Image (cartoon, helix red, strand yellow):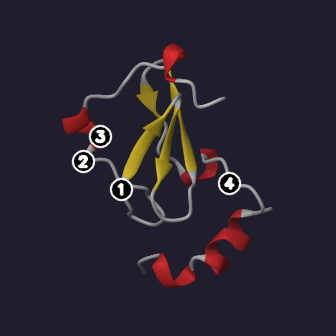
Amino acid sequence: MSGDMSDATPIDADVLSVFRCPLTRSRLTQEGNDLVAEVGGLRYPINDGIPILLIDEAKLPQGIASLDEFKQKFADQIPE
């Protein structure tokens, strides 16, 4: 997605404030049809208005080739 909010359904700010990245436990912000983690930039899709907060469904940030590489790069910011 382009990050364009025009085709995205905004998630209520109070609801969004409760959501966390399931891997880094960092806050999420909405960018278009994705929720983006503050730590690392994993992007979780929103399908038909429903956030899919599954690590295996997350899009990796640019320059990261695998989830293992992501975990190594951000190991100091991922809670055990």
Residue annotated with mark 1: 27
x and y percent of residue 42 in the render?
Answer: 57, 54
* Mark 2–mark 1 distance (CA, rounded to whole Å): 8 Å
Residue bearing the label numbered 3 = 16
Name the residue: 41% across, 77% down.
79
Q: Which residue is mark 4?
A: 60
Image x and y of residue 22, in percent: 44, 58
Number of other residues with Cα within 10 Å of mark 3, as a class: few under 14, some 14 to 19, many 20 or more:
some
Asked if marks 2 and 3 touch (Cβ < 8 Å), the reply is: yes
Looking at marks 2 and 1 on the same chain, the residue that comes earlier in the sequence is marked by: 2
For the residue pair 4 and 8, the one nearer the viewer reads as: 4
Residue 18: assigned label = 2
CA separation, marks 2 and 4? Answer: 22 Å
Residue 4 placed where, x, y %? Answer: 56, 24
36 is higher (above) or lower (below) than 75: above
Disc 1: CA contacts within 10 A as few (<14), some (14-19) or many (>=20): some
Q: Is residue 11 above or below residue 41?
A: above
Alpha carbon distance from label 3 to label 1: 9 Å
Instruction: Tell me which numbered mark, 4 or 3, is placed earlier along the sequence.
Output: 3
- Residue drawn at x 24%, y 35% is 13
- Mark 2 crowd level (few <14, some 14–19, many ≥20, 10 Å Cα): few
Secondary structure type for disc 3: helix
| Amino acid marked by disc 4 | Leu
Taking depth in this image into account, of 60 and 3 the one nearest to the observer is 3
Query: Is tag 2's residue or tag 4's residue first in the polypeptide sequence?
Result: 2
Q: Nearer the viewer, residue 52 or 10?
A: 10
| Identity, as a three-letter code, of the amino acid under mark 1 | Arg
Q: Position of residue 49 (x, y in %)?
A: 43, 21
Residue at 52% across, 29% down = 32
